[in-house]
Image (spheres, rainbow, N blue to C red):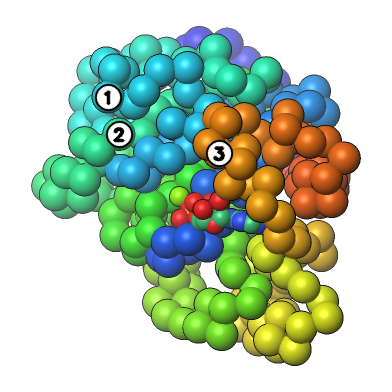
Amino acid sequence: MKGTPKEKSTVVFVIANHKGGAAKTTTAINLADNIAQEGHSVCLLDLDPQANGSRHIGLSHPSEIKYTAADLLSIPELPLAVFIHDETRVEGVSLIYGSIALENSDDLLRAEPRPNEVLKERIAPLMGKADFIIIDCPPSLKLLTTNALAAGTHLIVPVESGDAYGLHGHEDLLSRVKKMKQINPTLLNLGVLLNRHDQRQVVCKNMEENAANLYGAVIPIKIGTTTKVKQASSLQCTLRQLDSGNTVSQQFRNLAQWLIAETKEFREEV
Ligand SMILES: Nc1ncnc2c1ncn2[C@@H]1O[C@H](COP(=O)(O)OP(=O)(O)O)[C@@H](O)[C@H]1O
Ligand SMILES: [Mg+2]
């Protein structure tokens, strides 16, 4: 790969929120699927020790995988290719597996001379090769998430719309983003993605307003609620694979199309 001319700019979506249950993994998987359906190459990078995303779309269990994201961060001698699994349950989507070993990554990263910049260096060979990389972050603001923020090009923050405390602690996330912008000044904050949104509910309307005030932006495509999300994860398929006509399934397709259009100029910059 080294020495070959860069043909395009790779979009690196960072899907982050320090809260668990905010739909980071659901968003990462269904976005990956729908972006791939539009004909783009996508690599899902699972940075969560729970590895739910890897379990969902991987052909193997994360515990059976020799080199996972934890090794990507700790063994710089290994070429990036050994981490990328081209075959997954989702056509057009490759996977860098997460694993429980990521639990130790924070401690290991802390010992690095530039603890926030390890991931950026490690995925550099993919830049200009893949169309999209989607990073599924763990529910924390520690070094795994700050590494993703330092390596990313665009930030998406899924929030549970009906949760009155859904924006609790987001000043901390925003202050991490601000700090990482010193390292990664071009990181673009696309803002909050409202998940389980119901426009008829006052709590959801308030959330939209508060999210816009706090983040400066709310992604115009909102995601509703469906029991099919859980069904899809237990069947290890995406919402589209399960039921492409489902409203939430179509909302994820709209979101993918919106993001593809939104990043077009960026992708064509070389
Ligand atoms: N739009 C939705 N409708 C119904 N259930 C959802 C929706 N989005 C997420 N969920 C469910 O909420 C839970 C948390 O979602 P998940 O994507 O795992 O969050 P995170 O990765 O932020 O921890 C999962 O059980 C998932 O199935
Ligand atoms: Mg998750």
Tag 1 near tag 3, CB within 8 Å: no
Tag 1 near tag 2, CB within 8 Å: yes
- Is 67 displayed left or right of 211 in the figure? left
- Residue 241 % position (x, y): 73, 29
Choose between 32 and 23: the one closer to the eye.
Answer: 23
Tag 3 near tag 2, CB within 8 Å: no
Q: Secondary structure at mark 1?
A: helix
Tell me what residue is drawn at x 78 percent, y 44 percent.
Answer: 249
Answer whether residue 214 is visible to the viewer in this image: yes
Q: Secondary structure at mark 3?
A: helix
Amino acid at dot 2: Ser
Amino acid at dot 1: Ser
Q: Residues within 10 Å of mark 2 (few under 14, many from 20)?
A: many
Q: Is residue 102 above or below residue 74?
A: below
Identify residue for label 1: 63
Identify residue for label 3: 233
Q: Does ligand 1 reach within 8 Å of label 3's beta carbon?
A: yes
Q: Secondary structure at mark 2?
A: loop
Whichever of callouts 1 and 3 sits on the residue coming sooner in the sequence is 1
Mark 1 or mark 3, whichever is nearer to me: 3
Identify residue for label 2: 99
